[in-house]
Amino acid sequence: MSTTKHIAVLPGDGIGPEVTAQAIQVLQAVCDRFGHTFTYRYADVGAIAIERHGDPLPEATLDTCLGADAILFGAIGHPRFDNDPSAPVRPEQGLLRLRKSLGLFANIRPVTLYPSLLHLSPLKEEKVRGVDFVIYRELTGGIYFGDKGQTPNGAYDHCVYTAAEIDRISRLAFEHARRRRNKVTLVDKANVLETSRLWRKVVTALAASDYPDVTLDWMYVDNAAMQIIQFPAAFDVVLTENMFGDILSDEASVLAGSLGMLPSASVGEKTALFEPIHGSYPQAAGQDIANPVAAILSAAMMLEHFGLAEEAATVREAVQATLEAGIATADLQTGKASRCSEVGQAVAGMILTPVEVIEN
Ligand code: IPM
Ligand code: MG
């Protein structure tokens, strides 16, 4: 059945616009093949929005997002702000406000590896074979959003969680575990932090009352940082609070061989947002060399969110076939690298001209 969807496109900074363009090329190929209609409305966010409107998240951008079925997000950040602790507005504030305004409390980051790229992982191949886990990172609470400020001789960031905030993301994580290998690992620092003890209490009670069929285990965050490197294949669903999830998901992303491979979805109360987990990579901006795979796979997560499972699978298969054909950007190969746009074109091409299966 054909469907119509309105997508807000927030390309953002650095390589954001070029990888987003490839994701849209791929979405258009999906529309052509499956008979859907997607419309795209562009809006500014991040450093570019500060430059143009004096605000990293202009009101008009938020309105565009609220009126859309989903948001395709590029990247955010500019070196101009990174080394200036006194900058009154920062690009990142745009993303944080967007998450808060849309109630995007769950950030979902799947860590899957392509067999043809295992040799690129910094870990030995036998360690990363079979790695397939997903991180559920709480996104609108904790130290990111607690009271913060400066005192005459210092500064503070408060970490605050309510039981309800923990409960709602935990339910999503347990539901997802049921569709996977039925295991949730709660990562916290319950030996030190009061908020972590609350996470343990809430998650343990929820597991017992509503998800007795799912295995729950616990891990301190320092130990988890080690286990992700030592035994990455042992994880299924990792559930954690905002800042631990930020750090662990970057750590986990290198398992795949390149930061340019991993997508994410942020879901919650209002319009869901899909973005590659990599940053704005300003050194590469405008050169058509960035890896568009994470953005393309984020678009696949968007299709899944729309309930278009076959379309999402088609995109993932096309990405895999493209990589196996050796069409990949410089971060993935030492030989002749393809450009960002060539990879996007190849993926779109494979979607448009599916391989015929001949049955006899
Ligand atoms: C991420 C990023 C953001 C975060 C920054 C850009 C604010 O690192 O999405 O992981 O810390 O959440
Ligand atoms: Mg991060």
Image: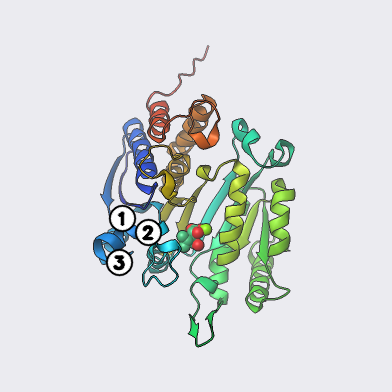
Expressed as whole percent of the image width and height from the top left, the position of residue 249 reads: 58, 55
As helix, strand or loop, the secondary structure at mark 3 comes to loop
- Mark number, residue 68: 1
The amino acid marked with disc number 2 is Thr
Answer with left or right where residue 326 lies relative to residue 77.
right
Q: Nearer the viewer, residue 20 or 329?
A: 329
Query: Which label number is shown at residue 55?
Result: 3
Q: Earlier in the sequence, mark 1 or mark 3?
A: 3
Residue 50 relative to residue 202: left or right = left
From this view, report whether residue 329 is shown above or below residue 60.
Answer: above
* Secondary structure type for disc 1: loop
Find residue 248 and report its horizontal and vertical position in percent: 61, 57
Q: Which mark is residue 54?
A: none
Residue 345: give x, y in percent of width and height: 38, 30
Tell me the amino acid under the disc marked 1. Ala
The scheme the figure's colours follow is rainbow
Residue named by callout 2 = 271
Q: CA distance from mark 2 to mark 3?
A: 21 Å
Distance (Cα) linking label 1 and label 3: 21 Å
Q: Earlier in the sequence, mark 2 or mark 1?
A: 1
- Can residue 213 be seen here? no
Dot 3 amino acid type:
Asp
Q: Between marks 2 and 1, how big is the CA–CA gap?
A: 7 Å
Q: Could you tell me which residue is drawn at 59 percent across and 60 percent down?
A: 247
Give yes or no for contact between labels 2 and 1 (Cβ–Cβ under 8 Å). yes
Q: Residue at the spot x=65%, y=73% of the render? A: 196
> Number of marks in the image?
3
**In this rendering, the label closer to the viewer, 2 or 3:** 3
Q: Position of residue 91 (x, y in %)?
A: 38, 62
